[in-house]
Image (spheres, grey):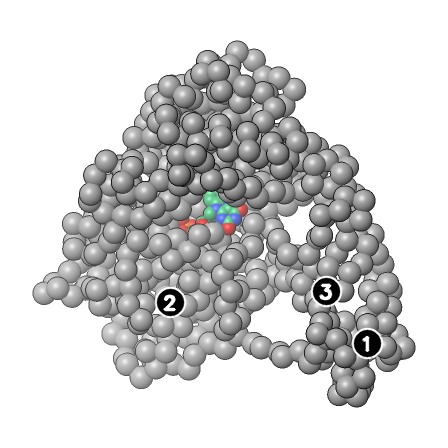
Amino acid sequence: MIRINQLKLPVEHTEEALWAKAAKALKIPVKEIRSIQIIKQSVDARKKEEIHFTYCIDVETAKEESVIHKVKSGDIGISEKKEYVFPKPGTETMASRPVIIGAGPAGLFCGLMLARHGYRPLLLERGESVEKRSEAVDLFWKGGTLRPDCNVQFGEGGAGTFSDGKLNTLVKDPLMRNRKVLELFVEFGADPSILYVNKPHIGTDVLSGIVSGMRKEIINLGGEVRFNSRVTDFIVKDGRFKGVMVEEKEEIPAEILVLAIGHSARDTFEVLNERGIPMEAKAFAVGLRIQHPQESINRSQYGTGNHPILGPADYKLTHQCTNGRGVYTFCMCPGGYVVNASSEDNRLAVNGMSYHKRDGVNANSALIVTVTPEDFGGTTPLAGIAYQRRLEEAAFLSNNGKIPVQLYGDFKKNQPSKAFGDVEPAFKGLYDFTNIREFLPAYLSESLIQGVEAFERRIRGFSRPDAILAGVESRTSSPVRIPRDESFECSMKGIYPCGEGAGYAGGITSAAIDGLKVAEAIASRFDRFSI
Ligand code: FAD
């Protein structure tokens, strides 16, 4: 195949136009092209009057060598086809099947790969199956009681199940794990375009079906997935890992444990700390969610309120504050909702989600400020968790458990809001007005205001007084890191920290990639589990 980079076409182009452009670039008639595969499609909207797609494509022709010889361009060359390869089984014997804690992207992708290669893993998940979990979350959003083991953070599919399902990652993996993860998403029901669009996304509705499909395959291949199975302790004898305790009553012997518990398993981090698993506090970011009309974001990014081909626009903004802190937008959800994403009683956290169509009226995104161990007010590895908890408790108390909401203009004036302006609220969960500044540390409020004012220069209307703020956005990434060595184990042999909770990922795709890495590490060392 011949790879062509930087092929530009207007966004409303036809399939024929792509073939014609490719033929022109290669200086051959269109009829000599046998097939075209899109490798990457990105939108270039720098000039609003000239928005176009930029493609990287692979073209199949009969005479590749002679065509390449004729066209002299840095953007054209022979495509190197690389494929993901799972390692051959190792030689060490497994006395018991591998146990994976957590059925989020890290645990599920690790489990699927191990199951497909004959290791019959056991997945332990504290929450419910994705189907029952969706019902529990819906009830909670309508005013029901929070279930501490089954909520937006916990349950099959992990933290990203009620999300926008953005799949882009900054991870560049030369071993093609990123591609493999996207291929697996497609295999289980995602639209094939996620393989080439620059910013792929799935949406919460599609993601749920994918998750249950993966679980069914793990079970069909001899693995096991147990819900309502919270790991409450780790059995350690003579300094060696020997197994786990489930729901304080069932002991499961194990010699290989994948710890894919996500960033919100605070109780589990506490037990790991007590059992002597080394971990360290790490920097993360906290702040609020901000909502604007999607139409105004579209206008700013594409020059029109509703682009018929490109759909709802996104944005990504950063600013360095005068106090030295970075403020940035994160996890932007076009056409989405701000959701109550709490997982602990009497504590409140928000996040964002959208459906596949992204057809909600608002754009929302996390507006967050970097915080480091110096801010946490303690030196233990769990000091960041204590910091998050203090913020979430204050948010909960400020509004009797309802999401604290304030218009940006009132946030600036340090006064509670009384009514919404022209921006319609789009929430999942109960909400009410309050003065968020009363519970947010001053350095965060000041940084957020500086950020919003700076972002106005990039997106007109970003600082509109009726933009809706909601808090607190405290679960942006893990507050701890569990160090692991080149064999992917932590200092307690047999335990493989994995995914976002252990500090090795920051999003759905990177967590899934880390799941693959850990599965590879286990498989290349051990022979298949055959008992
Ligand atoms: P998790 O997904 O957190 O999974 C950990 C699992 O472990 C959970 O299911 C939990 O129940 C289970 N568990 C924890 N402790 C125990 C225990 N003791 N015993 C048994 N089970 C346990 N990322 C993106 O890339 N794109 C997005 O659009 C996006 N949107 C998001 C929206 C929301 C509302 C949230 C909350 C997160 C979003 N994220 C998004 C972040 C993304 O979800 C995480 O980065 C990702 O899920 C991390 O994967 P993980 O497998 O490492 O951990």
Residue furthest out toward the front: 322
The residue where tag 2 is placed is 518
Q: Residue at x 64, y 28 (%)?
A: 461
Disc 1 target residue: 26
Q: Is residue 222 found left or right of 35 in the rendered image? A: left
Which numbered disc, 1 or 3, marks the residue that appears first in the sequence?
3
Name the image quarter holding residue 69: bottom right
Q: What kind of element bears circle 3? A: strand
Residue 46 in picture, x, y percent from top left: 71, 48
Q: Is residue 518 above or below residue 451?
A: below
Q: Quadrant of the N terminus?
A: bottom right
Q: What's the amino acid at mark 2?
A: Val
Q: Give 370 or 38, whichever is nearer the viewer.
A: 370
Q: Is residue 373 above or below residue 171?
A: above
Q: Position of residue 88 (x, y in %)?
A: 42, 82
Q: Position of residue 423 (x, y in %)?
A: 63, 23
Residue 299: assigned label:
none
| Image marks 2 and 1: residues in contact by CB distance under 8 Å | no
- Residue at disc 1, secondary structure: helix
Eye-nearest disc, 2 or 1: 1
Q: Nearer the viewer, mark 2 or mark 3?
A: 3
Quarter of the image with the C terminus in it: bottom left
On screen, residue 351 above or below 82:
above
Q: Earlier in the sequence, mark 2 or mark 3?
A: 3
| Mark 3 lies on residue | 6
Q: Say if residue 141 shows up in the picture.
A: no
Q: Nearer the viewer, residue 234 or 396?
A: 396
